[in-house]
Image (spheres, rainbow, N blue to C red):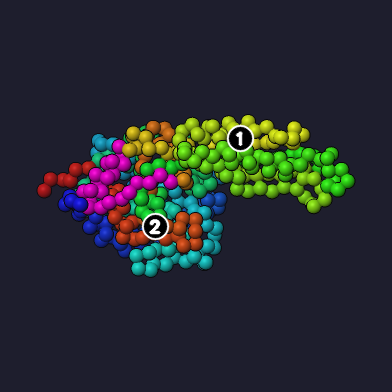
Amino acid sequence: MPACGYHVAMLETALAHEQEYLSDLVSLVRFESPTHDKAACDLLADHLEGLLSGEGWQVARHPREQAGEILEASIEGGGGPRTLILTHYDTVWPIGTLDRMPWRHEGDLVYGPGTCDMKAGIVSAILAIRVLREQGVEPRGDVTMLLTSDEESGSHHSRALIESLAREHDRVLVLETGRDDGAVKIGRKGVGSYTVGFRGRSAHAGNNPKEGASALRELAHFLLFVEELADEAAQTTVNLTVASGGTVVNVIAEEARAKVDVRALRAGEDERIDAAIRGYRPRDSRVEVVVEGGLNRPPLEPTPANTALWREAQERLNDLGLTLEGAIVGGGSDGNFTSALGVPTLDGLGSAGAGAHARHEHIRLRETLERVALLAALLAGKPNPG
């Protein structure tokens, strides 16, 4: 594959900063930051503000009462397209995980809680701007990086800010990790989560069971109903994943609960599922059904605008002498919100790695640094003459 000398210099610079990359990454990983621990998240936000300010970013803080503070960091560029970079610094791992899953660097692999999901993505954005500066190149447009603290729990405290900033920018680059094989994420399913409660009537299971209205029996009917809503051709999945109910063996179950996970790739599918779940009518009219929850993230579809941004990324990959595939995945990200607004969005540009939310979570270092070069190339303006 042909490569452009201007962009190859970016790749060489990114690869030359391996030790600095590792140093910054370990400093973030050692600040354990579980989503629901505001104090721990705020400590990391303090560290991140100092790190970003030292790199020349202008940092603003957005306090949140029930989540860690959100950081908005900006770099001035030329008059080209304004880029919003989405990252998050919260993780799924509780305090103390580092004692059981310590940071370690083995060959090309770097292990530790929160490495690929997604503290490496934050470090990649910082290094990409550093690469541009060392090449004497400014971003072709203003760059804003948003560092949120509640992505792993649904972005309830940050969604409004994400959407507001997206409307002020021309494109969005999401620095979540790529697919496990390294593919960039050009599509994501929308996500819905429901809790369905069933309240029936208790009775003695031996003496007068017919006087009871079994919440568990109704839950069983609901399971068959809800999973039939899936559509393989449309790539829509609906799964009842958690169920509980009843009290003791000789009592007809008065109460039961179920949780349902919904994933839909196409706009409209999520609304179809939502309407069906809320419209469920119990087989036993004596059982009351209450539906809580709903749709959390709309689909990130391969729209024309998103596809054009992916084509641009492929051109920069060609300039760098690199190749990456594009993939559609089941999990959601904050890019789902921005894509639904019509803002061109490309996801999975952070680290190359595997094991997000798993004990073998890790990044592949060289591939990750190659993606730093891709990010720098997407942000870069024209090189200075001479």
In the image, residue 220 above or below residue 92: above
Q: Amino acid at mark 1?
A: Ile
Check disc 1 and report the residue beneath it.
277
Which residue occupies the extreme right position in the image? 207
In the drawing, what numbered circle is on residue 165?
Answer: none
Residue 121 visible, this orientation? no
Residue at x 49%, y 31% (from the top left corner):
268
Q: Position of residue 123 (x, y in %)?
A: 36, 54
In the rendered structure, which segment of residues is drawn in magenta?
Answer: 308-329
101 over 10 or under it: above or below:
below
The x, y position of residue 240, in whole percent, is: 60, 45
Q: Is residue 211 left or right of residue 163?
A: right
Residue 378, position as x, y percentages in the image: 27, 44
Q: Is residue 365 above or below residue 262?
A: below
Secondary structure beneath label 1? helix
Residue at left offset 69%, top offset 48%? 244
Residue at the image position 39 percent from the left and 57 percent from the top: 353
Is-magenta flag for residue 376? no
Q: Position of residue 287 (x, y in %)?
A: 74, 36
In the rendered structure, the answer to whether residue 327 lies left or right of residue 241 reads left
Q: Which mark is residue 353?
A: 2
Q: Amino acid at mark 2?
A: Gly
Q: Is 286 in front, or is 310?
A: 286
The residues bearing labels 1 and 2 have C-alpha atoms spaced at a distance of 36 Å
Residue 14 visible to the viewer: yes
Going from N to C along the chain, the mark reached first, 1 or 2, is 1
Mark 1 crowdedness (10 Å alpha carbons): few <14, some 14-19, many ≥20: some
Q: Are marks 1 and 2 in contact (CB under 8 Å)?
A: no
Residue at image position (24%, 46%) is: 316
